[in-house]
Amino acid sequence: MSCKTLAFLALTVVLLLACGEQVAPTPGAEPASTAAAGASGQADSSQEPFVIGALDSLTGVGESYGIPFSRSKLIAVEEINAAGGINGRSLKLIVEDSKCTSADAITAYKRLTDVERVKIILGATCSGATLGVAPLAEQEGVVLFSASSTSPDISDAGDYIFRTAINSLKVGADIGNTMWTDGIRAIGTITEATDYAEGARRSAVLQFEKLGGVVVAAESYPTEAIDFRTQLTKLLAETPDALLIAAQGEVSGGTIIKQVRELGYEGPIYSEVVPTGANSLDIAGEAATGLKAVVPNPDLDTDIGRKFLDSFNARFGIAPWPWFQGSAYDGVYIAAECLRQTNDDQDADGFRDCLYNLTWSGAIGDDYSFDANGDVVGVSHVVIEVLPVAERTAENLGFRVLGAPAVP
């Protein structure tokens, strides 16, 4: 059996043990001791568990981040069960592989809803997968709650669709403002043809043009592409002040950076979060040095965030996507709180209403909430700059935080 299969199976393991605690534990807390939790300190095996689902990209273009997101959820589930469960019942998470595509996400969704009868789903990992499933979830009254899908279109996806991921409209506005503040006035863009990447590019261009900037050339590519020299040559022929890369996959993001430098481009490069991942930076090498990106703050500076990272790092190694993993971790605890309130994993309407009325403090921030569109409110971005290869470490993730995005 492969390591990937073992990791996947681990996500469905439920600790069905006995406990006296009647509420979900504090996120990030150590598992409750025997004395604190009752006779055994764990969830009551005499009651059926609460069952929820997850759509994570365990394979496909989003594998490099989908697996860490699932592992982060696993940690939260295990903590909740070890500390007494929810109203004395354990939590069971059934994970299906959405593969970062709409078609695969729909297949996975149907397995969760038709076979497992799940009404609450954490996911999907990728925007295209979430948007593919959202019409079904809305029609069938199933809550879809994503930690990482950022496409602007998700805001209008329906009343049962929520996310702790920050809307790409904000990502784009911050990228546009950053480029303009840096003195960039003309850009070329290269974008993977996915909902996430196109959403990030579209919103960045909207803000940049609003400030007076111009797009002198725009290229796109399919997910399966492995060589980008033709598109990059066309972009460089228009002599932009800077390039903006929007990628769904780390491999394409890193390869684009590497190839554009090999073509002789020496100007600034800007991006969203994906081209700053470890795999992308390994591929790009020194070519990525100086790249600037707008990302959710990777420094999880809440007590809960620090405890979560300590737990993840001890078990799996350095967290490669700290903020998004914290977002996935928080999502499980938020689900536990709403299940505590409804006491029914089939009550999607009650769960939805709980989310609308919730103010939460967790790994990714304090006192955040959800607006009328199900979008998270109260978390923000930072600008990062990729370091030279010699200065990149697992601990600094290969970049330094410059601070909050400037507002022109």
Image: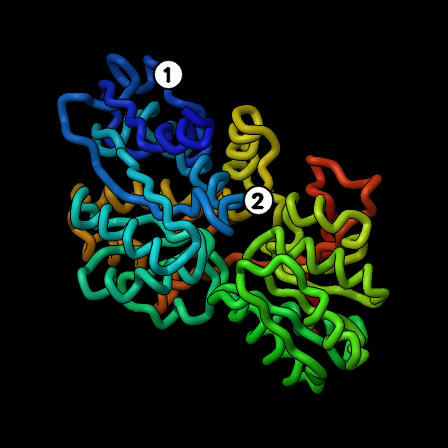
Q: Is 103 or 117 nearer to us in this picture?
A: 103
The quadrant holding residue 97 is top left
The structure residue drawn at horizontal position 52% and vertical position 66%, both measured from the top left corner, is 168
> With respect to residue 255, does 222 lie above or below?
below
Relative image position of residue 57 (x, y in whole percent): 43, 47
Q: Is residue 26 visible?
A: no
Q: Secondary structure at mark 1?
A: loop
The quadrant holding residue 170 is bottom right
Pointer 2 and pointer 1: residues touching (CB < 8 Å)? Answer: no
> With respect to residue 299, does 202 lie above or below?
below
Relative image position of residue 3 (x, y in whole percent): 46, 27
The structure residue drawn at horizontal position 44% and vertical position 27%, both measured from the top left corner, is 2
Residue kind at label 2, given as amino acid type? Trp
**Which label belongs to residue 70?**
none
User: In the image, is 321 to the left or to the right of 406?
Assistant: left
Of circles 2 and 1, which is in front? 2
**Which label belongs to residue 321?**
2
The quadrant holding residue 197 is bottom right
The structure residue drawn at horizontal position 27% and vertical position 54%, both measured from the top left corner, is 354
Relative image position of residue 22 (x, y in whole percent): 23, 30
Residue kind at label 1, given as amino acid type? Ser
Label 1: which residue? 33
Mark 1 burial class by Cα count in 10 Å: few <14, some 14-19, many 20+:
some
Q: Is 220 or 13 nearer to us in this picture?
A: 220
Q: Quadrant of the N terminus?
A: top left
Relative image position of residue 43 (x, y in whole percent): 25, 23
**Mark before the other along the chain sequence, 2 or 1:** 1
The structure residue drawn at horizontal position 18% and vertical position 21%, both measured from the top left corner, is 45
Q: Secondary structure at mark 2?
A: loop
Q: Is residue 201 visible?
A: yes
Q: Quadrant of the C terminus?
A: bottom right
